[in-house]
Amino acid sequence: MPDHFEISHFETSHVAPLIGYHRAPLSQKFGAPRQPNLVALVSVIEMLAPYDTPAAFIGLDGFSHIWISWQFHHNYRYKENQSKQVDQATIANEVTFRPQIRPPRLGGNQKIGIFASRSMYRPSGLGLSVVKLESVKVVEGRVLLMVSGADMIDGTPIIDIKPYVAYSDAHIGADSGFASNAPAPLTVTMTAQAQEQFAQIIASGQDTNKDSDKKVSLVAIIYEYQKQLIGTDIKHIIALVAQDPRPAYRREELNKPFVMRYKGVDVSFQLIETGQLQIIDVNNID
């Protein structure tokens, strides 16, 4: 009997098709929730052909939540290889294995094993999230999944979708290790200047779209969730800032502005003397 088994290349890697893309207000990692369902941000999954056929989704609307397998496409090591036009299998094999990381939840100082975390720097480069399924829409013959609570950014490649089954997927009383409770959100305030800037940008967008074609189209729906700032976005922006996306090692810095990009605006906020995060400036980037 041999001392070891020879493992083929096929057994150590797997290439999965991309079935869709996530379309969302957040286009950068900074500001994205660190876990799903911390912020009820509504977004869209645009399915790609041939996976966008309505027949593939019959019965899915009977489930309130779904599992999504996705790719950490803003992982800097993945992006470096992608810029060199290296295929996904090669990327998976060439990325140096990092056995430990420093999770923000532990202050960014304590190391834990990669498989005890949800870090993006994992061998597969895959993420897994359970989100609320708001609705299944068929537009121009193609399927759009409207979801809320996703911790993915705009353009995230989708690998798979499965229904969430409560009797087997939910385990009440499960031990969650160092992440036993949801992080407490910080209090967020907004300057009068920022409030006025929000109002002006929203009003400008309403004027621009007032005389536009009211026909529902796939492009129009995606644009609404990616770019068009509306009144309800303010509460989502406040909720995202309240999660404190700043690096753990910089959370004591007073009056140091940080910028979160949301749809077509850059939102600047900072920690003030009262211990609150304050939104101080909103700039239209379009």
Image (cartoon, rainbow, N blue to C red):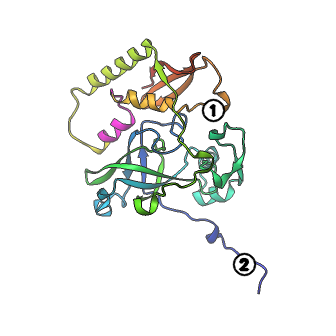
In the rendered structure, find residue 68 and report the number of the disc placed on it: none
Q: Which residue is mark 2?
A: 5
Residue at image point 72% right, 76% down: 6
- Confirm or deny contact between disc 1 and disc 2 (CB under 8 A): no
Q: Is residue 2 left or right of residue 184?
A: right
User: Does the stretch in magenta take in 221?
Assistant: yes
The reply to whether residue 165 is in sight is: no
Q: Amino acid at mark 2?
A: Phe
Give the left or right position of residue 214, taking residue 55 as reference.
Answer: left
Per the model, the C-alpha gap separating discs 1 and 2 is: 44 Å
**Residue at the spot of label 1:** 247
Q: Is residue 209 magenta?
A: no
- Residue nearest the viewer, comparing 22 with 172: 172
Residue located farthest toward the right when viewing the structure as drawn: 3
Please identify, in this view, whether the residue under mark 1 or under mark 2 is nearer the observer.
Answer: 1
Is the residue marked by circle 1 packed among few (<14), some (14-19), or many (20+) residues within 10 Å?
few
Q: In the rendered image, which quarter is residue 211 located in?
A: top left
Secondary structure of the residue carrying tag 2 is: loop
Going from N to C along the chain, the mark reached first, 1 or 2, is 2
* Vertical order, 58 against 192 (above or below): below
Q: Secondary structure at mark 1?
A: loop
Residue 262, how many percent across, how many down? 45, 31
Residue in the image at 48% along x and 61% along y: 17
